[in-house]
Amino acid sequence: MTFGRPLLQSFNNGVLGMALRARGYNNCCNPEHTGEAKFVRFLGRLEPKLCIDIGANRGHYSEALLKFTQARIIAFEPLPKTFAVLSRIAISSGGRMSAVNVGVGDRCTELELHFGEHTELASFSKEVLDIGYVGACNTESIRVPVVTLDSYFSGENRHLLENGIDLIKIDTEGFEYEVLRGAIGLIELHRPSFIQIEFNRHQLFRGHPLHSFSRMLPGYDVYQLLPYGSGMIRVVPDDPLANLFEYSNFVFALRDRVGHLLE
């Protein structure tokens, strides 16, 4: 086969790279490029009441939710210097947004948060430090409090869920699995319409393919966000082509409530 020759592998890699980007991979980090802006605008048309932003960083996703929806937003961010930026957004939101200065995981504890100049790479996971660009950046660490979503929304915060949950967005640099594991009770009881996770090579180093996330979320169909406002496409989570450890965003949609809107 002509294109299988060694001299043509650079060409093949270029074609493969373009195909992956068109499929929704490696379009970091502008929300218009990733497809997240299109999704948030779609969400706004459904008139959501409550959205939860986990790993909010400097609040770009929360700002999009404020702009394109009328939802109440609860944003979690453990790193103090990015939380300061997030807090200013919450203060200016007219009461629609709350910023919470804790991490989210699968148990209530304190954990070491690894971070550096590029705060969007901050992670609780030691394994992802073995990723070259992550380890080179995350040279500092700080101990921070961590809660589970199950614990946070019990007791005095239970009233926040009186209108249900429309979206849980999780961007925790390889800690997404733990966030979901600490929210199983909440998800089973309130059945959020959408759960969005960032997926990357971090999941390779943590041993969490997309298939493992789908097994935690029965009753949800999986969609991959497509770039530049192209929408989203349904994927089969046990298909190897849906388990590529490249930067992408996946949305789990509750089949019985919103599945018909995505067909």
Image (cartoon, rainbow, N blue to C red):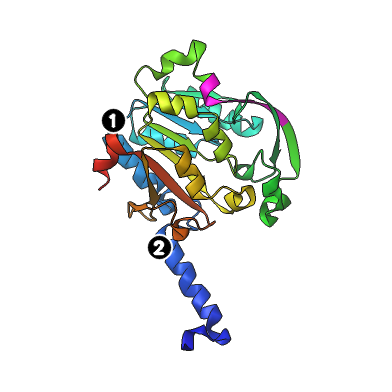
Within 10 Å of the Cα at label 2, are there few (<14), some (14-19), or many (20+) other Cα atoms? some
Write down the quadrant of residue 167 in the picture.
Answer: top left
Whole-percent x and y of residue 5?
A: 54, 86
The count of marks equals 2
Which residue is tagged 1? 47
Magenta segment includes 148: yes
> What residue lies at 39% left-to-right and 24% top-to-bottom?
190
Which residue is tagged 2? 22
Residue occupying the far bottom of the picture: 2
* Mark 1 or 2, nearer chain start: 2
Is 225 rendered above or below residue 167? below
> What residue lies at 49% left-to-right and 68% top-to-bottom?
17
Within 10 Å of the Cα at label 1, are there few (<14), some (14-19), or many (20+) other Cα atoms? few
Mark 2 belongs to which amino acid? Answer: Ala
Mark 1 belongs to which amino acid? Answer: Glu
**Magenta-tinted stretch:** 143-151
